[in-house]
Amino acid sequence: MDADDRARALLARAERVVALTGAGISTDSGIPDFRGPNGVWTKDPAAEKVSTLSHYVTDPEVRRAAWRTRLDSPAWRAEPNAGHHALVALERQGRLHTLVTQNIDELHQRAGSDPALVVEVHGTMRQVACLSCGERAPMERALERVRAGEPDPPCRSCGGILKSATISFGQSLVAEDIERAFVAAERCDVLLAVGTSLTVYPVAELVPTAKRAGAAVVIVNAEPTALDHLADAVVAGSISEVLPRLVAPV
Ligand code: NAD
């Protein structure tokens, strides 16, 4: 049995799948990942600075660059692809228990995944949050202010620094979200990791957690990941081609 058949068999008999998705599931929607061959950081290592909270807070030029990048983000035009739709299919088969995503693009919800099953452990780029008072608002309203000439729009309520409602390096995760993800991983029968290099912690720790609790681990990714040695099946290839095949009823 090759890895493809093993993965199909494991998913076909699973009753509680926890999917863990990363940037790789959205590259076929036109949103580059960070660490893949065409990744944003692979091409421009300095871009990592924008995702580090201390740089963002202390350097107005980093913030202005971040707002310019947000204005031009391919995510605003992106549509879900066959990989996102495959996870909707798995949900409709009654097998998907929780969808933990490191992505901030909301393409799972746009594909039709039940928002109640989706845990966005790294937040969402479709909202902004004030770093002082915590107030949240739609990203589009802040982008309108940037287009109208404010290069670094402050919070309208308290004057604090606004940032996309995502988790930057150096910023705490939301405790309830990460706890929900770990509880789900402890209780699943298959952990399906898709399009993630499995190098960002604590999220990557979901894989050994599920494995220790007795689940099978299936990894779908173009390149080797940091945790392939824990997997029961590693399927290499393009997610939008591979995933629909893996979840098709046998
Ligand atoms: P990553 O960039 O570290 O890894 C992505 C992996 O996906 C790579 O190993 C790459 O080989 C693989 N990949 C890319 N396209 C693929 C395809 N079409 N088919 C198969 N495999 C493919 O991503 P990560 O592990 O999610 O970590 C990056 C962090 O950056 C996350 O925390 C996330 O919050 C953030 N991020 C999010 C988005 C998004 O929301 N779409 C985009 C970029 C980064």
Image (spheres, rainbow, N blue to C red):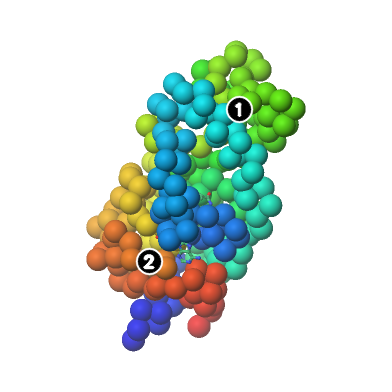
* In this picture, residue 226 sits left or right of residue 57: left
Whether 134 is drawn above or below 65: the answer is: above
Q: Is residue 245 at least partly visible in the picture?
A: yes
Three-letter code for the amino acid on which mark 2 is drawn: Glu
* Marks 2 and 1, how far apart at CA: 36 Å
Is 250 or 220 nearer to us in this picture? 220
Is 29 or 227 nearer to us in this picture? 29
Seen as rendered, the residue at the extreme bottom is: 1
User: Any atom of ligand 1 within 8 Å of the CB at mark 2?
Assistant: yes
Instruction: Tell me, for residue 223, which label it has, or none.
Output: 2
Question: In what element is the residue under mark 2?
Answer: loop
Residue corresponding to mark 1: 136
In the rendered image, residue 203, in percent from the top left (x then y), is placed at 37, 47
* In this picture, residue 217 sits left or right of residue 85: left
Disc 1 packing (10 Å; few <14; some 14–19; many ≥20): some
Quarter in which the N terminus is drawn: bottom left
Residue at the image point whose x is 60% and y is 68% from the top: 82
Whether 4 is drawn above or below 116: the answer is: below
- Kindly indicate the quadrant of the structure image that contains residue 155: top right
